[in-house]
Structure formats: C-alpha cells, structure tokens
Image (cartoon, grey):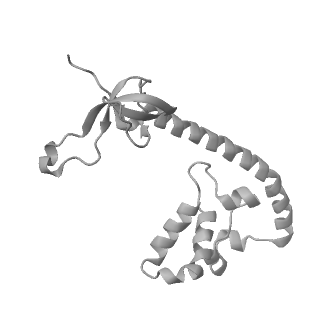
C-alpha cells in the first residue's frame, strides 16, 4: 500500500513536492475506492460492506444519491454488513488464487542450481576490464566451493586455497567444466 500511495503522490504532485499533506487525503480516498485486481473488490467495500459514494457524486444528481432513503438505508446497511463477511471470504479466496498463479509464474522461471561443496565454479565478473571493451570476460575463475552458507549461498576459495571475501549467491556462480 505504501508503494501505491507514494506512486499516487508522485504522479499527482509533479514538481510541487511540498504540498503532499494537502493531497494525501485524496490519494488515500482514491486508493480505498479503486477496485483491486487480486480481490475484485475495493478496500472500502471489504471494510464497510458497501461501495463508497465519491465526493463528486454528492454534488451531482446520480442514481445512488437520488434514490437514497434514510429509513430503507438502515435496513440495507444491516444487510450489507451481513453480506460483508461473505464478500471478504470471496475476496480472500480470489486473493489466494492470485497468489498461487503468481507463485506458479515465478517458479516456472527459476533455474535450479546443482552446486555442491567441493565443486569448481566460475563467478560473475561485475567489473570487467574496460580496456577489453565489450569482449571482456563476464566470468572469472575457477574457484572452489569451500563452505555452504545457505540454500543458494556459498563461500569460495581460489585454487591456491586463498579465501575469497564475501558470500556468493548461486545466481552469480556457474559450474566449471574443465575441458582437459
């Protein structure tokens, strides 16, 4: 939610960054009354059981405003509160389905790493020699895996048994296949 608020403030304010306090209530209102793709509901509707009337509708004769009746509204409000629980449950089911879909997409792109203790690996060279231009090597090594710190985190040594500083993630390593 913080990212959405900051994005809304950034786009709404432009260069006038000092006026963010005056505009914050409008950004929050917009966030609370916008349908979310994951749940299919607005946060306001999930909280109060009914959709909000936006401020511009109070000054215009819309159907929702013209058909408002205080007496029938009390009964409708109770009905909405009873249905709010059902709306929340449906929204949580939709949210869980969206999370499963996102996890499936993410896991499909994962590349398994078969790096083990004692393997020889190459490590990614983040600062290639500028004299070599675009033909500079992006991998350097070989190095030995001498300690497994976590599921995809390793400590390295060079072939002369000198420790390499810091921990290396498996994304920045690849197995070294000696051609000889």
Specify the quadrant of the image occupied by residue 177: top left
Q: Position of residue 50 (x, y in %)?
A: 73, 60
Relative to 131, is 120 on the left or the right?
right
Q: Is 111 placed left or right of 126 in the picture?
A: right
Determine the residue positioned at 47% across, 30% down.
Answer: 147
Q: Identify the residue at horizontal 63%, vertical 40% (top origin).
A: 96
Question: Which quadrant would residue 116 be assigned to in this image?
Answer: top left
Residue at position x 54%, y 62% from top?
A: 4
Q: Picture coordinates of residue 137 (x, y %)? A: 20, 39
* Quarter containing the C terminus: top left
Q: Nearer the viewer, residue 50 or 129?
A: 129
Foreground residue among 41 and 118: 118
Question: Does the image show residue 33?
Answer: no
The quarter in which the N terminus is drawn is bottom right
Residue 32 position, x and y percent, is 63, 64
Residue 95 shows in this picture: yes
Q: Residue at x 49, y 30 (%)?
A: 148
């Amino acid at each position: 939610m913080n990212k959405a608020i900051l994005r809304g403030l950034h786009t709404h304010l432009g260069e006038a960054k000092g006026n963010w306090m005056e505009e914050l209530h409008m950004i929050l209102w917009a966030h609370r009354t916008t349908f979310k793709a994951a749940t299919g509901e607005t946060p306001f509707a999930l909280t109060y059981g009914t959709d909000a009337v936006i401020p511009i509708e109070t000054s215009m004769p819309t159907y929702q405003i013209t058909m408002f009746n205080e007496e029938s509204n009390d009964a409708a409000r109770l009905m909405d509160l009873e249905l709010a629980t059902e709306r929340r449950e449906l929204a949580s089911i939709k949210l869980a389905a969206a999370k499963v879909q996102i996890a499936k997409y993410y896991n499909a792109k994962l590349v398994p790493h078969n790096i083990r203790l004692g393997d020889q690996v190459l490590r990614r060279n983040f600062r290639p020699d500028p004299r070599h231009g675009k033909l500079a090597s992006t991998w350097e090594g070989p190095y030995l895996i001498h300690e497994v710190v976590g599921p995809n985190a390793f400590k390295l040594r060079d072939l002369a048994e000198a420790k390499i500083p810091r921990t290396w993630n498996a994304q920045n390593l690849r197995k070294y296949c000696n051609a000889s």
